[in-house]
Amino acid sequence: MSSILRRQVFRAAAGSFAAVPRMQIQAIPARLTLTARSYASASAQEAPLKSNVSMTSSAVVSSTKNLIIDNTRIVAGVVVSRQPLILRDLSPFEQEYFLYQKQLERDNAAPFGAEFYFKKGSVAERRWKQQEAERNARSSTSTSSSSSSSSASASSAASKATGSEASEELTEEDRVAAMESKIEFNDRVTEADRKNDVRSLERALQRTLYLIVKKPREEHSWQFPQGGVRLCENLQEAASRELQEECGGNMDLWFVGRVPIGHHVYSHPKGFQTEAAVAVKGTKVFFMKAHIFAGQVQVDNKEIVDFAWVTKEEMKNYVSEDYYKVVEDMLSDF
């Protein structure tokens, strides 16, 4: 393309762009930036909820009217989860399986000599000899349990002698190296687990925790955060706004997709009216999914009076039986 033709194309594109009204140009939402925070961190003042939801359409039309379709009130709920932080404990069957696989791998390994893997006279070689002596001692003990008592005592004495000889070869350098290479694991049971603090996110590290809130009423008080969808507002925007109103802005969240993961329909008594004096026959709740990365819920004692982070099994003790049957399939077993 020649330079003259290129300039003409650029002028035509610039002229067509200038002819577009300003109202038709959509604003690009700002990129979400997450700072290093913990679950226990708290903000100094009230701030907008940090999430990946763009509120551009709600800013254009700030309507407070609830969305009602066919005399049914449309509500957006949020299933906020904290994912497991550590791997779960293996079951007895899984432990035996991995132990068996490890033993098979060791038995089928190529029979190279020790000098192939270790330098002769090195610390690693002496440490390996000690570990071999311990393994031989354990295997001799397990084998001798099914044999006579005399042969068992003889093999045990031989294994102890082998272990003592290997231990005598260890020097002070070996002991220091063993202490430095020792890995200390943190306790898998936290202080929040011991206190059964259901408000803490530092508990049940092996399980998925879900946020439920308590409304100031007698029946059906415990549920997921939810609220009515306004006109010109999609489900994701409504869920983010309701979460901000009920639980504060001290949470870093990520909404997973724009499609609900489930819904719940229930009927109202005859003559029931909303706050805007509109008669409705029922409510349909659409549940959106979100993950929390940092922060914590802030109770305002207006919209909600209490909250809890619970597992799937613990949720049975809070919500009603009918409500649990509806949301049960949306929750993870781990």
Image (cartoon, helix red, strand yellow):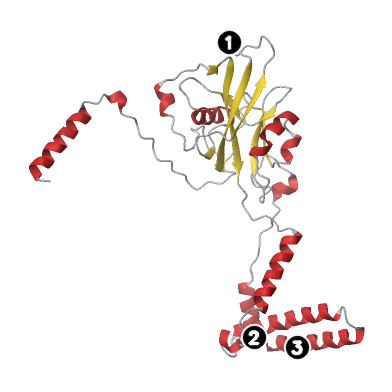
Residue 110: x and y, percent?
Answer: 61, 82
- The 10 Å Cα crowd at callout 3, few under 14, some 14 to 19, many 20 or more, is some
Establish if 185 lies above or below 285.
Answer: below
Hey, which quadrant is residue 309 in on the image?
Answer: top right
Q: Nearer the viewer, mark 1 or mark 3?
A: 1
Residue pictured at 52% horizontal, 27% vertical: 238
Q: Which residue is mark 2?
A: 126
**Farthest-out residue, left:** 4
- The 10 Å Cα crowd at callout 2, few under 14, some 14 to 19, many 20 or more, is many
Residue pictured at 64% horizontal, 31% vertical: 224
- Look at the numbered discs 1 and 3 and tell me whether their residues touch, using CB distance below 8 Å: no
Q: Which residue is mark 1?
A: 278
Q: Rounded to the nearest whole Å, what is the CA distance between mark 1 and mark 3?
A: 87 Å
Q: Which residue is mark 3?
A: 162
Q: Earlier in the sequence, mark 2 or mark 1?
A: 2
Q: Rounded to the nearest whole Å, what is the CA distance between mark 2 and mark 1?
A: 83 Å
Amino acid type at mark 2: Arg
Between residue 73 and residue 123, name the one nearer to us. Answer: 73
Between residue 185 and residue 275, name the one nearer to us. Answer: 275
Element on which disc 3 rests: helix
Residue 261: x and y, percent?
Answer: 58, 35
Residue 71: x and y, percent?
Answer: 58, 14
